[in-house]
Image (cartoon, helix red, strand yellow):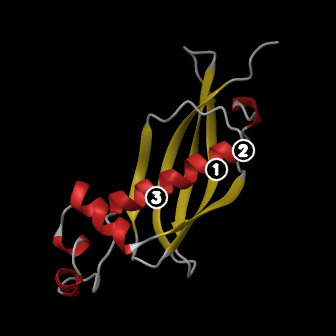
Amino acid sequence: MQYFEDIVVGTKASFGRYAVTRDEVTAFAKAYDPQPFHLSDEAAAETHFGRLSASGWHTCAMTMAMVVENFKANDQASLGSPGIDELRWLKPVYPGDTLRCETEIVDKRASQSRPEMGSFRSKMTVFNQHDVAVMTFTSIGLIRTRPIA
């Protein structure tokens, strides 16, 4: 199990593989971001996107799926997150793209009021299959401290 004490500032990691499908793009858009350029090729062709594109919020959700899989694979004592900072959608994400993540731990802090947890900040970059950055943000993670034996 990876605890707060195991987090090292400066650590970098690459993980994830998420294939973006047309059906998922339109289903997400219908439910959560029903703008025309997320729903139809014809509407998207009349915009700067040029073709059907995923919602930025869908890109966030796909990234979260990769993050959680990475937590599971690394057996991290995650306690969730109070939020993110500096979210930027840099390039459109299209059906047929394959996303992956790169992250770097930029700082960590022990909680002053909750000794059973700490927090850390990570700079996240999401890339498509052409190694083009499509999204960045800074995440704030909460994590358990190592239990006292």
Q: Tell me residue 131's x, y (percent).
A: 58, 78
Determine which residue is flagged by label 2: 74
How crowded is the residue under tag 2: few (<14 C-alpha within 10 Å), some, or many (20+)? few
Q: Tell me residue 111's x, y (percent).
A: 58, 21
User: Along the horizontal axis of the image, is 41 left or right of 25?
Assistant: left
Question: 55 above or below 68?
Answer: below
How crowded is the residue under tag 1: few (<14 C-alpha within 10 Å), some, or many (20+)? some
Cβ–Cβ below 8 Å for labels 1 and 3? Answer: no
The local secondary structure at tag 1 comes to helix
Question: 98 above or below 102?
Answer: below
Looking at the rendered structure, the kind of residue marked 1 is Asn
Q: CA distance from mark 2 to mark 1?
A: 6 Å
Determine which residue is flagged by label 3: 62
* Residue located 42% across and 39% down the image: 83
Determine which residue is flagged by label 1: 70
Q: Earlier in the sequence, mark 2 or mark 3?
A: 3
* Residue located 29% across and 84% down the image: 51
Cβ–Cβ below 8 Å for labels 2 and 3? Answer: no
Of 109 and 127, nearer the camera is 127
Q: CA distance from mark 1 to mark 3?
A: 13 Å
Of 65 and 88, nearer the camera is 65
Looking at the rendered structure, the kind of residue marked 3 is Met
Q: CA distance from mark 2 to mark 3?
A: 19 Å
Cβ–Cβ below 8 Å for labels 2 and 1? Answer: yes
Question: 39 above or below 120?
Answer: below
Q: Which quadrant, please, contains the N terminus?
A: top right
